Amino acid sequence: METALAALLPPPTLAPERLHAAMRYVALGGGKRIRPMLVFAAGAAVGAPQGRLLTAACAVELIHVYSLTHDDLPCMDDDDLRRGKPTCHREYDEATALLVGDALQSLAFEVLSQPGLHPDATTQVEMLHLLARAAGSRGMAGGQAVDLASTGRSLDLAELEFMHIHKTGALIRAAVLLGALCGGRLDAALRERLEHYAKALGLAFQVMDDVLDAEGHTATLGKTAGKDAAQGKATYLTLMTPRAARAYAGELIDTARAAIEPLGERGRRLAEIARFVVERSF
Amino acid sequence: METALAALLPPPTLAPERLHAAMRYVALGGGKRIRPMLVFAAGAAVGAPQGRLLTAACAVELIHVYSLTHDDLPCMDDDDLRRGKPTCHREYDEATALLVGDALQSLAFEVLSQPGLHPDATTQVEMLHLLARAAGSRGMAGGQAVDLASTGRSLDLAELEFMHIHKTGALIRAAVLLGALCGGRLDAALRERLEHYAKALGLAFQVMDDVLDAEGHTATLGKTAGKDAAQGKATYLTLMTPRAARAYAGELIDTARAAIEPLGERGRRLAEIARFVVERSF
């Protein structure tokens, strides 16, 4: 991933140099790369070729990195630390961070629309449509808007999950489906299994994020710990104890694993990622 | 365009309502719609179907509107007025304006990746690639970064045109090529003619923008007049008199019209737009 992203990002010697350096600053050298892992794991389930998966994984990660860069801006979460480094607007400036996010979003679609990426251009168009929809106002950006609107007021579990299904769930779902589409068109049964898996995994991931944010240390997380509570954000821990939250994450992971059980050995990597999500400490 | 955009934008009754209302606020009810006109005019030159052109025109306009929304933000040009209305962050708030721009960019790619938009999916992928590249750091977003970096210092003509070729030229070029691609694959000679046309037209448009910004009235322009000079931005009028700038725009338009002359009657609408660009007063 690191090598592939470094090759896809414009070189820092190309004008505008500062923008290109800042794009590389946020996209390289950090992150759990969960979404790329999901692209590869779903691709493995259908026997998709590695090169195509790598490109799709880069596109999804570029969308994710753009969203982090914008979420950290002063008018949003106003955060100073991300992936163990100063956030983009702290290291550069606000205008540069804004343009970095904008340009990374464009780059994601540029990368995924590479001529000949997929032998079936109709499937490639479908992949682009899926990613665009996942990123937009009925997906990730919409979830971010709900998150903003909910700061300082209490949400019930249904509202909280509506937010997460959009804010992080949409892109996780896109990662899984994109990986599978790298192999070719999807039959309805497989698509449904993968969607169930992705939905449960996405929520489990978010439950654990809230637990780790509350319990974690800034150094391990690479971002400011305890920030959610300090900002009056609704989290799972405003609705349940850490112990209950961990149990809930465990149930969601069981659901995710059950959804892909019929895949047998082909779903092994997807199942491993599910386990990683509840066992991770960062 | 107004009807088509209204149908493509999510309804203001759909959650997140405030974000969707704000997206409609910036995208509907205003603007010269020059880029859509170029899509249609280039499409007319190759006999492309109207419905497909309308979708491509919407995609290009959504990218343009997103860029205006972000350019107006306090960390960028910090503008209060756009298309005769308060800018998005003045009418709503900064975080909403940020997400509006982000979501409009995604929507542009969602719209252009509509299944079956083009009977030749390979051409549709090419259209998506072209738009993504035009929007990114080697196109519009890159031009914006150069613009920011040049504020308060003087540029020579070559530097100024480098900025404009990226900041506005890239999307104007994309509009023309997308319109033509709506008809099918392009032969190299036609593509080259259209690219020459688009490059000269884009620069002429910018020269006239600078003239109108310096001479114009806020009410006619629908944005704050005289802003460029006040912000110490490099413009054509820091390099030449208004009279010389108008003459230069006229020469560029002659170049643009010459490039498409071999198209004959098929290029009539492209030629008309070129005339409009130098004769417009807003």
Image (spheres, coloured by chain):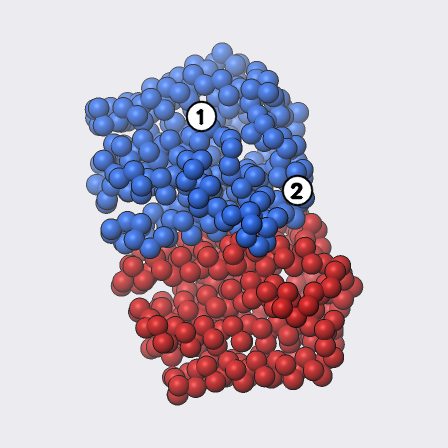
Chain colours: A red, B blue
Q: Which residue is mark 1?
A: B205
Residue B77 at x, y = what percent? Answer: 63, 35
Classify B88 as above or below A132.
above
Q: Is residue B18 left or right of residue B174?
A: right
Quarter of the rendering containing residue B187:
top left
Chain of the residue that carries numbered disc 1 in the rendered image: B
- Residue sitting farthest toward the right: A230
Counting residues from the start of the chain, the first of labels 2 and 1 encountered is 2
Residue A55 at x, y = what percent? Answer: 40, 64
| Nearest the eye: A98 or A191 | A191
| Nearest the eye: B251 or B183 | B183
Q: Which mark is residue B278?
A: none
Q: Which residue is mark 2?
A: B92
Classify B129 as above or below A190.
above
Q: Is residue B222 visible?
A: yes
Residue visible at 31% across and 27% down in the picture: B270
SS state under label 2: loop
Quarter of the rendering containing residue A83:
bottom right
Residue B4 at x, y = what percent? Answer: 41, 40
Residue visible at 55% across and 38% down in the picture: B26
Disc 1 residue type?
Phe
The crowd level at tag 2 (other Cα within 10 Å; few <14, some 14-19, many 20+) is some
Q: Is residue A82 left or right of residue A194?
A: right
The crowd level at tag 1 (other Cα within 10 Å; few <14, some 14-19, many 20+) is many
Q: Which is more foreground, mark 2 or mark 1?
A: 2
Q: Is residue B11 left or right of residue A115?
A: right
SS state under label 1: helix
- Residue sitting farthest toward the top: B243
Q: Is residue A54 visible?
A: no
Counting labels gives 2
